[in-house]
Amino acid sequence: MPQDVHFDIPIPSWTAPELVAARERHLQWARRTGLVGGVEAERRYLFSQVADVAAYSYPDAVGADLDLAFDVNGWFFLFDDQFDVPRGEDPPAVSVCEELIDLLRLPPGTVPSSSSPLGDAFADVWQRMAEGMSQRWQERTARHWMDYLSANLTEACDRRAGMVADSGEWMRLRRKVIGVRPSIDVCERVGHFEVPAPVVHSTAVESAREIVTDVIILINEVYSLENDEARDAPNLVTCLMRERGCSRPEAIGELQRRADAQLRRLPRVREQASRLCEPLGLPDLAQEATDRYLDAISAYMRGIYDWHRLTGRYTPHVAQHTSPTTPGYLNVANLATRTT
């Protein structure tokens, strides 16, 4: 079973003491915004435990900041499943995606042009994310959101066209469509700090983000394998099996080795980042923010791994109710039904 596959991530685990209370506050928000409504929708949503990822991934977040992290992550997964539609259909979420790209070009707090719950909920979390953050941070994070949304349009187009990606093409798309960049921007927001320019654009800090992103992709490709196989959707494991003629365990082993190789790079990258601010003439506070950021995104990566091993989203139950002809487990078409 993919959830039994082990990745060696040498970073301590963490769980928010507020997990249960934050989950309930988040569910109230999801009801209020119209994302989740009705007994069956709530049952599916709570079983999936998608918003709970915030409780393992943001050690700096407490109270309202933890609520924001829960709401952002809950939105991510609900939005993602709107693109999982029966083969041959166009996802209605494409229009929402385009509207949100337009919204992100405007100042935070702008009322979305769409009256959809997904659009309204995103406008709410984007406004809360931007609160107290500099214009530079807002512009950087808006670009990351737009990259994520545009990648969803790419994936939807490729799926509709029947394109079969090779492993390299799929990995390039996944680096954007998995949404790690805007998620690690949340680390700064809930911690109430910002990595100063030009450090945030340095090779060392960018390399740290690349490592975190790639390790999370490799973990997700393994843990989502059964769901993807049931949907006949792309997955890096099946790409490697097809390209190399290797077995499923051999392909999974290759992803574990790739993750290990990336994680071995992280101490060197962190050491480089620890020496950035002095030659740039930046104060000690800038180096403290940089170190804190590297700690935060490393903890985020560890939390994502721990959540994958616990969540209902990647259990056999979900895979058994998935096929190329059914909508995603948290697609609105399923949330409105009474199926198990």
Image (tube, helix red, strand yellow):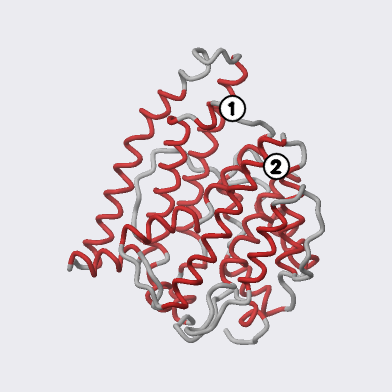
- Neighbor class of circle 2 (other Cα within 10 Å; few <14, some 14-19, many 20+) is some
Label count reads 2
Up-down relation of residue 332 to residue 98 (above or below): below
The earlier-in-sequence mark between 2 and 1 is 2
Mark 2 belongs to which amino acid? Val
Q: Secondary structure at mark 1?
A: loop
Q: Nearer the viewer, mark 2 or mark 1?
A: 1
Q: Looking at the rendered structure, which numbered label has been put on residue 197?
A: 1
Q: Nearer the viewer, residue 289 or 166?
A: 166
Quarter of the image with the N terminus is bottom left
Q: Residue at x 65, y 86 (%)?
A: 337
How far apart marks 2 and 1 lie (CA) works out to 27 Å
- Write down the residue under mark 2: 62
Give the farthest residue toward the left.
Answer: 245
> At x 69% / y 64%, what residue is drawn?
99
Dividing the picture into quadrants, the one containing residue 270 is top left
Q: Position of residue 193 (x, y in %)?
A: 66, 31
Check if mark 2's residue and mark 1's residue have beta carbons within 8 Å: no
* Amino acid tagged 1: Ala
The vertical placement of 60 against 76, above or below, is above
Which residue shows up at 40% across the image and 78% down it? 162
Image coordinates of residue 129 in percent, x first then y, are 71, 46
